[in-house]
Amino acid sequence: MPLRFDKWLLAAAMALFGASVWAAELTVSAAASLTDAFREIARGYEAQHPGARVLLNFGASGALLQQIAKGAPVDVFASADQETMDQAQQQDLIAERRDFTRNALVLILPADSRLAPGALGDLAQDGVKRIAIGNPAVAPIGRYARRALENAKLWTAVESKIIHAQNVRQALDYVARSEVDAGFVFATDAAVMKDKVKVAFKVAPDVPMRYPIARIAASPNAGEAKRFVAYVLSPAGQAVLARHGFLQP
Amino acid sequence: MDMAWSALGLSLKVAGWATALNLLLGVGVGFLLARARFPGRDLLDSLLTLPMVMPPTVLGYYLLVVLGRRGWLGSWLQESFGINLIFTWQGAVIAATIVAFPLVFKPARAAFEAVDGQLEQAARVLGVAEIGIFFRVTLPLAWRGILAGVLLAFARALGEFGATLMIAGSIPGKTQTLSVAVYEAVQAGQDEVASTLVLVTSAVCIAVLMAAGRLAPGRIANR
């Protein structure tokens, strides 16, 4: 009897361990700002293609790139800026790159904040003690924010107030919890926590914040990857993105 | 390289403070639980051991909720003293202290329980005051067990990552400890920085272990 139990246990363990290896799976690494939209897109894709399973991996675009560069088994990569995808391209990691959506940079405050900055220059005031941005080394939102502050000749004035978040969603969370006085996020992120944060103003971009998507060159599921990218670009995928506040590329 | 040294300095500062605090707290609470009899003692022991088994992220979340600007303790500290612990190295000390606390408290309690009560009784008969008995009899007898825990606590505090990142963030030169700096460097693909940091960390860990090895046999020989 104990022996039989062991056999069953072993069989169950093997089935559980192997299950994820056998199923037809597609791994998609996407920028943190795409979290909600891509979850919905993945559900739509799975509904349209029975048997397909989409695994989503969200994070700062730069961190995702490093995972891919180190050989993570990713099939599709969607980044929040061109720079990260350029790096992927230079390392010959990707194939068939397309811009699929666009976003806007906003400054947000905790919903109950008494501050009312009307322009970037107001961030230099004493009332603003901490400003969250995504870490510019890995998060596109951090680079966009830093560039906006640099262009306004404000970076040196506010640098000591900057708190680096791991990605844009952590910056959003810091603002929502009032741990910082203000934060830079994408317009679509601010909309996720409408009850906890308020948008102070939209930052005029010097370049359009277009999101590229590409198939990973080393992916063994090229066909499936192509199908997923096509779905994101299709009217169905674009409708989901628009519903989450993303703009036409 | 500058970054590696500042991260190392910060890690040692945070781990040092956490260890010093745990020496006081762990020994005090360990002694109390070893000697005092009161209802709920087992429950209290379990609660105090919790940081050892709980994921550091759970602890980080608790700390963020309690110590954050909207937390009950955090808002009180902010309003009464203007203290804000989030994104400060003191916040990192609190995270490291709590995470490493059971590593001092558990061995301390066991060591105090193992102390022969007859020796304390003998001191009492000879007219030594209770406080004197603790420092001159009980503590020296329990010291070896406590020291082992203290070294482990220092190592654990040095390596603390999850809770620290959640409440202290990752501000270079201010709250970016070695383990957080390694994570950041790998995320950003700065492999050379990561390699330097990893080597520095490994060297420190070996030094701690060797120090522990040097202390421990002497203690055993004395016994």
Image (spheres, coloured by chain):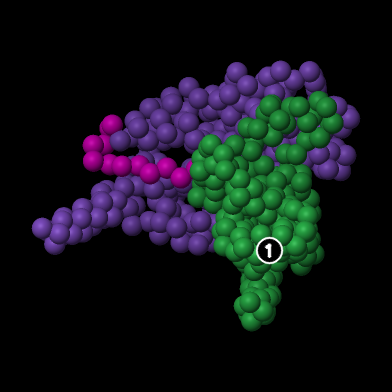
Chain colours: A purple, B green
Name the foreground residue: B101 vs B221. B221
Quarter holding residue B116: bottom right
Q: Which residues are magenta?
A: A47-58
Q: Percent x, y for residue A101?
A: 52, 33
A214 vs A205, left or right, is left
Name the residue: 37% across, 35% down.
A42
In percent of width and height, residue A207 lies at 68, 37
**Res A69 seen here:** yes
Specify whether B139 is left or right of A77.
right
Q: Please report the residue visible at 78 percent of the width from the left and 62 percent of the height from the top.
A: B9
A115 is higher (above) or lower (below) than B29:
above
Q: Is residue B176 magenta?
A: no
Image coordinates of residue A32 in percent, x first then y, are 54, 39
Q: Which residue is mark 1?
A: B122
Give B44 or A42, whichever is nearer the viewer.
B44
Residue that appears at 23% across and 41% down: A51
Could you say whether the residue bearing mark 1 is in a helix, strand or loop?
Answer: helix
Local packing at callout 1 (Cα closer than 10 Å; few below 14, some 14-19, many 20+) is few
